[in-house]
Image (cartoon, rainbow, N blue to C red):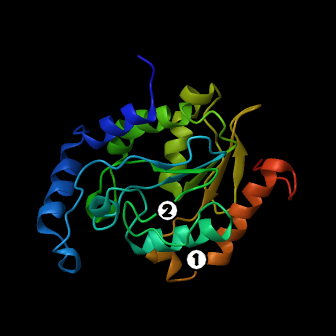
Amino acid sequence: MADSFEILRREITDCVLCPRLVRYRERVAQEKKREFRDEPYWGRGVPGFGDPTARLVVVGLAPAAHGSNRTGRVFTGDRSAAFLVRAFHAAGFANQPTSLHRGDGLRYRDLYLTAAVRCAPPGNQPLPAERVRCAPYLERELRLLPNARAVLALGGFAWDAVRGIAADVYGVPRPTAPFAHGVCTPLGAGRPMLWGSYHPSPQNTNTGKLTLPMLTALLERIRDGFDGSGPRPRHHA
């Protein structure tokens, strides 16, 4: 049977491959954060969201316990989401600068947003084995996004997740370039470029390691490279 985003969404939502993550996501959904005690929590796996014809695919780390694990939409309802979607909007990829809850009217243009791991992890730290178990979902998403020209990994964990599946998805050797903000490396002739950015976590944004102008400029640089109107990517050797 042919794969589809709908099939993939159902499988991710119902996934129970990682017992540690299942226990944690469900416990958080039952206990709730005081701020959201009157709201229903999603408490399941979180699928990707965005434009199925996108040229830019953005890969994050994992759902936040009281963000995506609460709202059911990737990068929605927490401080990381607030920062990231402001940058998407400023760079022309989103129709609004906020991502608060499913049904809030947010739409992405030419962008598909997903994550390396689909369940909220304790301490925001998935185990490498959990990334491996989730890898087939990311592989399938990338296969369902044939127009992709760039894959932007938010943080080193997501960078390694994309590098780990590059051979299976694109038929190329595993990229060897180390992670850094603004670095890019080709995934083969006629394949997307892999780009890196610091993750938009409060740890990075509150300290100024990642600023809104930094991330917006990187997104614009990637976007402008699609039609040749901007500077060409600086490849990592």
Secondary structure under badge 2? loop
| Viewer-proximal residue among 9 and 27 | 9
x and y, in percent, of residue 98 in the image: 49, 72
| Viewer-proximal residue among 142 and 175 | 142
Name which of mark 2 and mark 1 comes first in the sequence: 2
Q: How many marks?
A: 2
Q: Is residue 194 visible?
A: yes
Residue at image location 28% in from the left, 68% down from the top? 66
x and y, in percent, of residue 222 in the image: 73, 56
x and y, in percent, of residue 133 in the image: 34, 37
x and y, in percent, of residue 186 in the image: 72, 41
Which amino acid, by three-letter code, is at mark 2? Leu
Label placed on residue 209: 1
In the picture, measured across the screen, residue 80 lies left or right of residue 173, that is left
Q: Which residue position holds label 2?
A: 106
In the picture, measured across the screen, residue 1 lies left or right of residue 158, that is left
